[in-house]
Image (tube, rainbow, N blue to C red):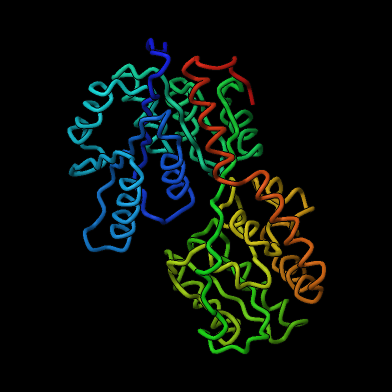
Amino acid sequence: MTPAPRGAGDRIRVVTLIDVVARIGGAEVLAAELIARLDPERFDRTLVVYRRLEPGSRQRASQDAVIEELRAAGVHVLQLEGGSRWDLRSWRPFLALLRGRRIDIVHSHLFGPNLWASIWTRVARVPAFVAHEHTWSYEGRRARKILDRWAIATAADAFLAVSEHDAAQMREREHIPARTIRVLPNGIADADPGAVPDLRAELGLAASTPLVGSVGLLRPQKDFPTLIRAHATVLERVPDAHLLIAGDGEEGPALQALIAELSLADRVTLTGYRPEGSALAAAFDVVANSSTFEGSSLAIIEAMGLGRPIVATAVGGSADLLGHGDAGVLVAPSDPAALGTAIADLLTDPQRAQALGARARDRQQAEYAIDVQVRRLEELYREVLGLSGAPRSA
């Protein structure tokens, strides 16, 4: 797309498009953080959300809270209303926004918004389009690969991956041209240490109880069955250890059944959704991530920022985050024995655990702070509008 002429002092008009901004996943949290933290002196910021959420639902309440925060930060917010996601009439206000305010860049997050943005930016002749993929397994789903390559990538001035691993997947499995791909890892703001609850007291545990924890949606990607089975291995060496999993999702009942089957009801707790989210990790002696695939896990980055020792499966971008083992322990996915052994090793070696946590904290501050990523994104916006140096390939 050809950039429109701009005055030297003009603010760059950016629209972020996503289906929801409820705090239900890393992509939604990151999209809101990025648009809120763009320099308001240089960027005119608008967020557009298009999925209808049920009034009174927890997701709706969460989204309403995020939107209120964004508006307080000076971000314009447009909520589209329609009978379904395929109701084309509901997109009329979006098209009017793109044309009426002469938007410079549309930045979409996740596959659905990326696909819609690839259509409407062409229709409205928006000067630049940035598509942002946060991760997926790249297995099966042939139609998804076709649309990523032939609809989204052909329209995008930049197609963002959250890790070098995902960038390689995009090149090698989807055959997206390398010149289109950029890597923008996830980042987080500094945690509020005052928000940490006393989880041991809440669970009726002694203050000295070793506590292993994981925070995430209860869905297949996170492979919490492997973590629960791993805890049985942990208990062989650390009999009083307790495992806490915070989050909700469709796998909750099956996980409760597995806990009962393994007779771990007094050693494993599923808390459901916790509003403190990332702050919970500050209370864990070891943070565990058992995912079968990841892009750039916010849960891992948040634990790094809190200086916690981490055991994670060596999948996707997790190895990059943890310095390939320098700032955390990496194990093979879907291997309860290996995961349990690594966790028990750290619980029984607090000096090593502390050293890993300190290195994780230093690495997060240098590479995965939200303001570091925002500055990189601001420069990318200037690049795709032809306001800085030549494009770089991944």
**Residue 17 occupies which quadrant of the picture?**
top left
Query: What residue is shown at x 34% (from left), y 31% (from top)?
Result: 116
Q: Would residue 330 be visible to someone looking at this image?
A: no
Q: Pick the residue in front: 214 or 66.
A: 66
Q: Pick the residue in front: 77 or 162.
A: 77
**Residue 55 occupies which quadrant of the picture?**
bottom left
- Where's residue 108, x and y in %? 41, 34
Query: What residue is shown at x 56% (from left), y 53% (from top)?
Result: 298
Against 287, is 32 above or below? Answer: above
Query: What residue is shown at x 54% (from left), y 89% (from top)?
Result: 204
Q: Pick the residue in front: 122 or 12.
A: 12
Left or right? Give the position of 69 relative to 338. Answer: left
Left or right? Give the position of 324 relative to 291. Answer: right
Query: What residue is shown at x 23% (from left), y 57% (from top)?
Result: 54
- Where's residue 111, x and y in %? 43, 38
Total labels drawn: 0
| Placement of the N terminus among the 4 image quadrants | top left
Against 103, is 47 above or below? Answer: below
Against 115, is 289 above or below? Answer: below
| Placement of the C terminus among the 4 image quadrants | top right
- Where's residue 383, x and y in %? 53, 20
Left or right? Give the position of 206 relative to 327. Answer: left
Q: Would residue 67 be visible to someone looking at this image?
A: yes
- Where's residue 324, x and y in %? 76, 49
Q: Pick the residue in front: 386 or 338.
A: 386
